[in-house]
Image: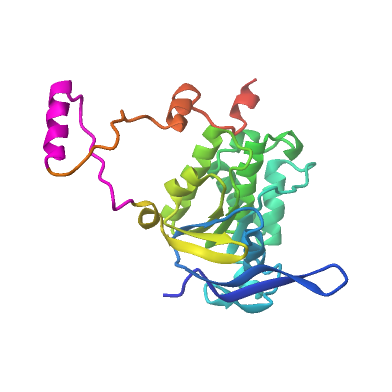
Amino acid sequence: MTPAIELRGLTKDFAVGLRGVRLRAVDNLSLRIEAGQVYGLLGPNGSGKSTTIKVLLGLLAPTTGTCAVFGNSSREAGARCRIGYLPESPYFYRFLTGRELVAFYGRICGLRGPGLRDRVREVIAWVGMENSADRRVETYSKGMLQRIGLAQALVHDPELVILDEPTAGVDPAGAVAMAGMILQLKAAGKTVLITSHLLGQIEDVCDRVAILDHGRLVLEGGVGELTRDDQRVALVMKELPAGELAELQGWLGARGRVIESIDRPRARLEQVYLQRVGRSDSGDEKERS
């Protein structure tokens, strides 16, 4: 089966200054991302993530190596039409309404007439922006900008969706909502490539991850595979009386085993927050006020 993304020996150099000095942003990177996966591209600032994405989008040409999207070179227009992209800090025309903005990008992607109107209505509803779609983009919060940005990335129904830090600056409820939408995209058969510094979110939504450092691949694999600790076993049970706990410790001690720690399970802070607040920033609260 043809992979959604295949990088082979991808290297990208940039000229720095006037002396012909070369800066290597991506160094011999090879990756294969299967269709239908949610894939995390991780690494510190300057690790080569953004450069890799720009090559995938056809905005940069590799210095050496190849980059294919569904079997076609990323430099071909046919490959670009199969990609939807939400940049980290999108610059949208702020005088447009959300609806006009999504329609604008739909026209760029070749949609016209009733088909365009129907698709704009559909994706705006899907991201939860119906009540704010006719407001100007300049009035949107960060969370609302990310939602309308996702709508414009999806308006042409792409097979591959690239999300660059989709929850940067978004409140916790908005981050949870974005994670839910990513999983819905996967359920719809889309391939999603996501970069994020929120590693907890990456764990929740990604099937596989790649970690880059100084342009090189340092680790790649399934999330469960990379985070599993085969040297320890965790047991969770209901309240254990002190006497029975002492007996258990003695039984384990007789077999050369030691309980390293005893903890009470905790809810994630994210869950506590959502129980108290329970909404994301889709603009509905501002509309009602």
Looking at the rendered structure, the number of numbered marks drawn on it comes to: 0
Where residue 87 sits in the image (x, y, percent)? 66, 52
Q: Residue furthest right?
A: 18
Corner quadrant of residue 130: top right
Corner quadrant of residue 221: bottom left
Where residue 120 sits in the image (x, y, percent)? 62, 49
Instruction: Choose between 240 and 195: the one closer to the eye.
Output: 240
- Mark yes or no: residue 114 visible: no
Instruction: Choose between 46 and 279: the one closer to the eye.
Output: 46
- From which residue to which does the magenta span run? 229-254
Residue 108 part of the magenta-drawn span: no
Residue 240 part of the magenta-drawn span: yes
Where residue 255 sits in the image (x, y, percent)? 13, 44
Where residue 235 sits in the image (x, y, percent)? 23, 38
Q: Is residue 207 above or below residue 67?
A: above
> Where the N terminus falls, by quadrant?
bottom left
Q: Is residue 139 left or right of residue 43?
A: right
Instruction: Choose between 253 and 126: the one closer to the eye.
Output: 253
Kindly identify the residue that appears in the image at 47 percent across and 28 percent down.
274
> Where the C terminus falls, by quadrant?
top right
Kindly identify the residue that appears in the image at 17 percent across and 44 percent down.
256
Q: Is residue 132 left or right of residue 41?
A: right
Q: Is residue 36 above or below residue 135?
A: below
- Mark yes or no: residue 61 visible: yes
Kindly identify the residue that appears in the image at 71 percent across and 48 percent down.
101
